[in-house]
Image: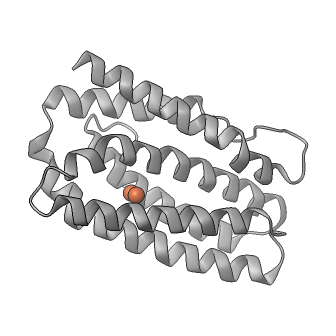
Amino acid sequence: MRTTPANAETTEDVVDLLRAQHGRIRDLFDEVMDSEGKERRKAFQQLVKLLAVHETAEEEIIHPMARRLPGGDGIVDDRLAEEREAKELLSELDGMDIEDPRFLKSLDKLRIDVLTHARAEERYEFDRLKDQFSPAQLKGFAAAVRAAEATAPTHPHPGVESATKNMLAGPMASVADRVRDLIRDARGKH
Ligand SMILES: [Fe+2]
Ligand SMILES: [Fe+2]
């Protein structure tokens, strides 16, 4: 069942957009687990791409601002450690056959870790950060994140069966670069 809020694609507030992405990430984990074959591969690639866009956006926009909150350094260090662990688990998954039962087992671990991480972000960062950004920043960053996602490739190497492996190594790194560039442009404007 889809649980993404209806306004997820149109919000002009980057904190709301990132919160809505948490919902989409949760839905994509379900899609990967509930599908098989080509459908599973496609859903997994979408998940990898969304995670690359989302976590990079948080590293650029949310965590630096959260460091300024009381107790912020500890909060952000914990979140960054969780993100690092998730990336490691994601690259393990990347080397696996998606039909291998071990794939689903590791994916389920990643799912629980990522969703726990997302809840901690919402509670300790998102809910406390809204007042820290100007309306122009919230809007400018939302546009940058949306533009980065829209232009990021989902299928960087069409026709290659093990495309996900290539995605993490090369194109996903370029997705992260693109997100960073667009966010830094937006920062320059506001
Ligand atoms: Fe995160
Ligand atoms: Fe997040």
- Give the x, y percent position of residue 91: 68, 62
Is residue 37 shown left or right of residue 171? right
Question: What colour scheme does the image use?
Answer: one colour
Q: Please determine whether, in this image, residue 169 is positioned above or below residue 106.
A: above
State which quadrant residue 143 falls in. Answer: top left
In front: 37, or 129?
129
Q: Quadrant of the C terminus?
A: top left
What's the residue at 31%, 32% (across, down)? 141
Q: Furthest residue to the top?
A: 189
Q: Is residue 165 visible?
A: yes
**How many discs mark residues in the rendered view?**
0
Image quarter for residue 28? Answer: bottom right
Give the x, y percent position of residue 104: 70, 78
Give ligand 2's quarter of the image: bottom left
The vertical placement of 45 against 111, above or below, is above
For residue 43, side relative to residue 187 (left or right) = right
Is 8 on the left-hand or right-hand side of 178? Answer: left
Where residue 151 appears, as percent x and y from the top left, is: 58, 28
Name the residue: 26% across, 16% down. 189
**Of residues 117 and 20, the one drawn nearer to the viewer in this rendering:** 117
Q: Residue at x 57, y 80 (%)?
A: 109
| Quadrant position of residue 64 | top left
Name the residue at 29% across, 18% down: 188
The reply to whether residue 1 is visible in this rendering is no
Q: Where does residue 56 sit, x and y in percent of width and height?
A: 46, 45
